[in-house]
Amino acid sequence: MDQSVAIQETLAEGEHCIIAVQGVLCEGDSRQSRLLGLVRHRLEHGGQEHALFLYTHRRMAITGDDVSLDQIVPISQDFTLKEVFPEGELYILGSDVTVQLDTAELSLIFQLPFGSHTRMFLQEVARAYPGGSNCDNSRPNGKALLVDPSSRGQDKPENLLTRQTKSKSEITDMVRSSTITISDKAHILTMQRFGLRDTIIKSRLVQKEEDYTYIQNFRFFVGTYNVNGQSPKEGLRPWLSHGIQAPDVYCVGFQELDLSKEAFFFHDTPKEEEWFKAVSEGLHPDAKYAKVKLIRLVGIMLLLYVKQEHAAYISEVEAETVGTGIMGRMGNKGGVAIRFQFHNTSICVVNSHLAAHTEEFERRNQDYKDICSRMQFCQVDPSLPPLTISRHDVILWLGDLNYRIEELDVEKVKKLIEEKAFQTLYAYDQLKIQVAAKTVFEGFTEGELTFQPTYKYDTGSDDWDTSEKCRAPAWCDRILWKGKNITQLSYQSHMALKTSDHKPVSSVFDIGVKVINEELYRKTLEEIVRSLDKMENANIPSVSLSKREFYFQNVKYMQLQVESFKIHNGQVPCQFEFISKPDEESYCKQWLNANPSRGFLLPDSDIEIELELFVNKTTATKLNSGEDKIEDILVLHLDRGKDYFLSVSGNYLPSCFGSPIHTLCYMREPILDLPPEVISELTLMPLQTEDDGSRLETPMDIPKELWMMVDYLYRNAVQQEDLFQQPGLRLEFEHIRDCLDTGMIDNLSASNHSVAEALLLFLESLPEPVICNSAYHNCLECAGNYPASKQVISTLPTFHKNVFNYLMAFLQELLKNSAKNHLDENILASIFGSLLLRNPAGDQKLEMTEKKKAQEFIHQFLCNPL
C-alpha cells in the first residue's frame, strides 16, 4: 500500500512526498511505529530542498486523517543515515534493516522492513542529500544508498567485488559459527534495477528450472491462535514444540492480540512484544532459530522463524497487510502475509481473521476475496508488477476464518462432539460447504478434522461457552494449503492451553523445496547467455494489441469496471511500460489503472493487461460537476521501440456520493432524474451562496439521502450489536447507492451493517466536511469547552449546521441503547471525529494531539444536551 498518498494530503503547496516507508522508532526498550516520508520542497528561486517527515499513524494510513506529524528532519550537510547492527542479534537475509539517523541536534534509530520498497526509499534519500544526485546509487556495498558524507567516494572496487561475490556457503558458515552475524543485506538492497537482458535471463532460468534443481523436504510448523485480547499466561511449548522434531521453519499466527479501543484505532500495543517473547521462548529447544519477519495489523500478527543454518537461503522477503474492517480500512478484520524465497521455491504465508457471526458467511467469503485481490508484494526488480498471493509455489493459509456450524442447534452440536462424530458434524461446516461451492479457497486443501471444535470455551477451562449468548461450538481456527510436494504430517488442536476462549491449532508439513545444484545451474546459465548473445542485435521490438479503444458504460461510484486486452510480442524480447504524456505526472487519470502497468515479453509471447476504472471520493465530485469526464489517452511505450496509443472513454452516472451538502439540499429530485447541466450548476455553486434566496427551489434542511440512511438505522438498528464497527457487504452497498441515487428508497433491502457503512462512506465522500475546513482550528481550540464549541457550530453554514445537529441527535439515540449495541461515547467519537472534522487540505502540519482533540470535540456533543 502506497502510504505516501496519506502524507501528501498533509503537505502544503509546493511540497511533494516522493516516497514513504513504515518503520519502528527504537528508543531503549521502547518500540513505536513511525511513518517516514521523504518530502521535496520547491524554492521560489527554482531550487529545491528535502526533509524527512516523521509521523505517528494508524496502521492503515490511507488518508491524511490517519497520520499525525511528529517531527521534521531537514536533509542538510550534517545529515547522516547509516546501517547499524545491534549487538547480540542474529541477522539473516530478509531480516529488518536497522538504520541510524544523525544530525547536529538528534540521533534516532529506526528498524525498516526488509524488501524492495525500503531499498527504493533509502536510494531516494541518498539522492536527496545535497549533491547526492551525482553519486552512484547502485554500488553494491550500499554506502551510497545510506547517507554519510564522511564515507562518500572511499570504497575501493576490489572491496566491492569481494563483498558482491561472497558465496552461499560462506554466509552459511557465518550463521553457524557466530551469534552476531552481519548479513549481506546491503548488497541485496542496492541491487541495480534489472535491465531487459537480465529480465530475459531470469525468465529463461525459471523455464529451465528442472534442469538445475532437485527437491528436498523441509519441515514446516504452522500454528494459529485467537488469544481473545489476553496476555500470555502459560508457556506455549505444548502448542509449538511438544511431541515433534525440531521444524526447519515456524509460521505462527495470532488473532485478537489486543481488543482495546487504542489498538483498534491506533497501531501500537504492548501485546505484540509479550506474545513475540512467548513464542520465541516456546520454539523447539533442540534447534536455534532466527526471526525472519514479524508483521501485524491491529490484532492480527504473523511471525516467521527459520533454523539458523537455513538463514542464507531465505531471500526476497516482503510483508503486507489488508484491512477488511469497516470502510475497508479498519484492521479489526483482514489479513497479514509474509512472502519469501526459500532456496528456489516461492512461499506465501497468510494469516487472516474474517468476519464473525454465524449468518455472515457471505461477508467472510468477501473478506477472503478482498485479501486475495488487494494483497500485493513488491518484487526485487521494480520494473516487474507486484506479486499476488496466488503467484507462489506454496501457499499456507491460517487463521480464525470464523466459519461456523449451520442448521444444527447448540445441543445437537455438543452431542455429536461428545460422540466424537466429527465427520457427521463436518457435513454442516460452513467452510466445507463454501469450498464445495467454489466460492472460497479454490484449489486449496485442508486436512481431516479429527479434533473437536476450537471455539467457544469459557476462558481458563475446557468447558463450552456458558455465557448468555451460549455460542455453538465451531471449527473457527483452520489451516489450509496449496501447492505441489506438500505432505501434511499432523493437524490438531491443543486443549492444554486455556488462556483464551479459542484453542490453538497446529499443522506440521513436509514441503518439497527446489534446491539449486550449483554446477548444473552454471551450465544452464551459460547456455542461456550464449543463446541470448546470438539474438542481442536483432530487430527493433514490435507488438500487436488486440484492442486500442475502450468504452466504460454507466460507471458508478465505487463500483469497479474492468476492460482487458492482449499484447502479443513479435520475435524480439521487449520491455513495455505505460508512460506519462508531456506535462502530466501520471500515465493515466486518477480513476484509471493499468494492471500490470509495465513488464517484459519473451519472443512470440502474450500478456493480458486489465484497465481498471474505479471512481472514489477523490474523483467523484469533478465527474459529478462535469469538470472531468471519463476520457483519457494512454501511451504504451516499448523500450527501444515505438509508442502505441490507447483511447479510453465512457459515461459516469452522477451520485449523491461525492456531492456537496448544500448541493444535495437543493436537489429535491433524485440526482439521476436531473439533467446533467442542473447537476453541474448545483455542484459548482459556491458554499457561500447556499441560502441567499436567489434560487427558485426551496431547499431541504438536510440532504434527503442522509435522512433516508439515518431513518433506516433509527427504525431498524438502534440495538444492533457492533454497529459502525462491522463492515457490510459490497453488493449491498451498491444496492443502497442505487436506491439513494434513484430515489427508490422503498426498495431498500440491506443489512444494518451495510447501511451503517454506507452512511460513513457518504460522510467521507463529502468534498467539504460537515464541519467546514474553515472552522477546523477553532474546533480544536474549543475542545473541552462545550459552550465555546457550540458557538463554533452555530457559525457553520445553515445546511452544515443542520446536518451536524441531526447526526449528533441520532448518535445520542444510539447511546441510549448502549446496553444492547455495546457502543459508547469513545467509540463513536473515534469513528465520527475524523469524518465530521477533517484536516483542511494544504494546511495539515499535524501535531500529535490533533487527532485526540478532534475526538474530544465530538465527544462533548455526545455527552451533553444539544
Image (cartoon, rainbow, N blue to C red):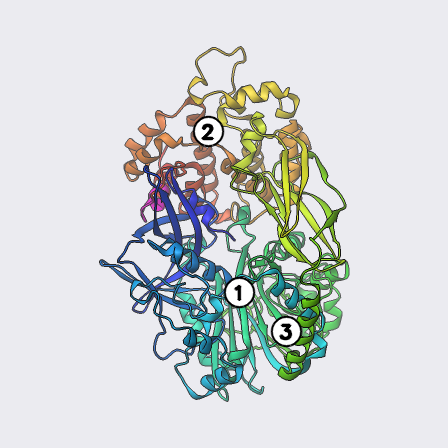
Quarter of the image with the C terminus is top left
User: Which portion, as a residue range, is magenta?
Assistant: 846-854
SS for callout 3: strand
Name the residue: 64% across, 27% down: 743
Name the residue: 62% across, 29% down: 654
Q: Which mark is residue 803?
A: 2
SS for callout 1: strand
**Mark 3 sits on what residue?**
345
Q: Position of residue 731 (x, y in %)?
A: 67, 43
Identified by mark 2, the residue type is Val
* Sooner in the amino-acid sequence: mark 2 or mark 1: 1
Name the residue: 44% across, 27% down: 800
* Marks 2, 1: nearer the viewer: 1
Q: Position of residue 478 (x, y in %)?
A: 63, 68
Q: Are marks 2 and 3 in contact (CB under 8 Å)?
A: no
Q: Which mark is residue 51?
A: none
* Sooner in the amino-acid sequence: mark 1 or mark 3: 1
Q: Which mark is residue 318?
A: 1
> Label 2: how many residues lie within 10 Å, few (<14), some (14-19) or many (20+)?
some
Q: Along the horizontal axis of the image, is 28 left or right of 386?
A: left
**Between 528 and 412, the one nearer to me in the picture:** 528
Identified by mark 1, the residue type is Glu
